[in-house]
Image (cartoon, rainbow, N blue to C red):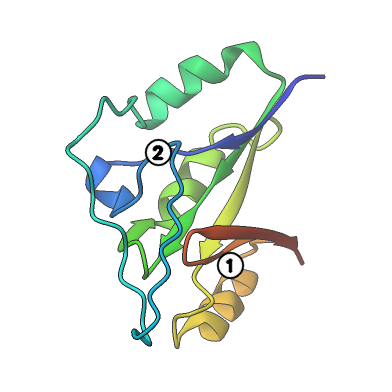
Amino acid sequence: MIVDCHTHIWQSPDQLGQMDLGEVRHTRHRHRTHPTPPPRTGWRSIPSGDPDYHWSQSAKVDKSIVLGFKSRYLRAEIPNRFVADYVSRDPQKLIGFAGIDPTEKSAVEDLRLLLLAGWRRFRAIDRARPSFGTA
């Protein structure tokens, strides 16, 4: 069985916020209490992230994990509803993870609502460092 364990979909590259694909920057500031996100480089060649393109690229794998994303630090959000709608196309092949930003004041309530909506897989983003979990 072949599983693609890290994929994303998006409606617009703007949903990626300050994230540079394939590049993680660590900045340290001695006198700042709140770090600022790294500046966005000029737009690179970003692959298509629409659901139809993702589906065509997933043809070669048995399962594909599709990750939601939410980060206040990076000013990015790929809505969980968007991921859920896409994953519902083929729930035997597509596995959705909801994105939660634990630095948001609403994180606990967001998690509660996701659980009520039936989500059982989550991805928490603390700045640019992701962590995964299941309920």
71 and 85: which is toward the camera = 71
User: Could you say where residue 60 lies in the image, as x and y percent from the top left?
Assistant: 63, 11
Q: Secondary structure at mark 2?
A: loop
Q: Is residue 116 shown above or below 70? A: below
Q: Is residue 94 left or right of residue 12?
A: right
Residue under the point 36% across and 82% down: 34
Density class for disc 2 (Cα within 10 Å; few <14, some 14-19, many ≥20) is: few
Where is residue 121, by image quadrant?
Answer: bottom right
Q: Quadrant of residue 63?
A: top right
Q: Are marks 2 and 1 in contact (CB under 8 Å)?
A: no
The residue tagged 2 is 21
Q: Where is residue 104? Give x, y as percent.
A: 44, 81
Residue 87 left/right relative to 104: right
Q: Is residue 41 above or below residue 45?
A: below
Within 10 Å of disc 1 (Cα), the crowding (few <14, some 14-19, many 20+) is few
Q: Nearer the viewer, residue 88 or 31?
A: 31
- Say which residue appears at 47% left-offset and 66% top-offset: 127
Q: What residue did someone put label 1 on?
A: 117
- Residue 33, compared with residue 114, is above or below; it is below
Q: Amino acid at mark 1?
A: Ala
The tag earlier along the polypeptide, 2 or 1, is 2
Image-quadrant location for residue 130: bottom right
Residue in the picture at 50% in, 52% down: 68
Q: Nearer the viewer, mark 2 or mark 1?
A: 2
The residue depicted at 75 percent of the width and 61 percent of the height is 134
Q: Nearer the viewer, residue 5 or 39?
A: 39
